Image (spheres, helix red, strand yellow):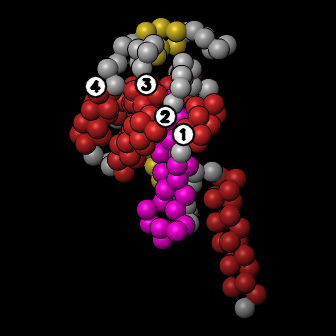
Amino acid sequence: MLIPHDTRIALDTVVDLVNTAPETDRPEDERNDGLADVEALYEFTRRHRISGVGDLGEKDLRAVQDVRTRFAEIFATQDTRIAAGLVNSLVAAAGTTPQLSNHDGYDWHVHYFSPDASIADHLAADCGMALAFIVVAGELERLRRCEAPDCRDAFVDLSRNRSRRYCSSRTCGNRLHVAAYRARRREAAG
């Protein structure tokens, strides 16, 4: 699947955004919200080199948390109609204004948000359009959650044969493979 550079960046951003959500299947005292405050939102924008971010406040934080919830709903469904409806809703509410841009050392790419858009509209438009391309390509099954029992992180499976099962082969995948290897060794030893 050929994915342009700007779409790949938007997919990485939406995955990271979804993964900031507190894990609802854990006890409340063990839930960790990666976007719990405005400073965490500023850090998110720095980490993802999101351009044009001005002063952020509580209203921006709540709006981004709402967008995050709606993106998580897209990762939770395998129904193309539902995913398309969610993407359409996000993109329409953001007031998309496609325009070509080259900034911060990036070659020409498309921004789908207006220059004065809020951070929530920026994320909804750019990341929503990246997800739209996945839906249009008939590749919704590439939007996945890690299969490791203690991890439910979102990821986009860009492997050729759509076989990726873990958010990271270096952490979750390796940990499970080592555990399986050790279990086989114990069983063989009797």
| Residue 85 spot, x, y in % from top left | 24, 36
Total marks in image: 4
Q: Earlier in the sequence, mark 2 or mark 4?
A: 2
The quarter of the rendered structure image containing the C terminus is: bottom right
Q: Which residue is mark 2?
A: 57
Q: Are marks 1 and 4 in contact (CB under 8 Å)?
A: no
Element type where label 3 sits in the image = loop
Question: Circle 2: is it few (<14), some (14-19), or many (20+) Cα within 10 Å?
Answer: few
Mark 2 vs mark 4: in front = 2
Q: Which residue is mark 4?
A: 92
Q: What is the magenta range?
A: 10-36
| Residue 41 spot, x, y in % from top left | 55, 38
Element type where label 2 sits in the image = loop
Q: Which residue is mark 3?
A: 118
Q: Are marks 3 and 4 in contact (CB under 8 Å)?
A: no
User: Spatial distance from mark 2 to mark 3, Cα to Cα?
Assistant: 11 Å
Q: Could you say which disc has been placed on residue 91 in the image?
A: none
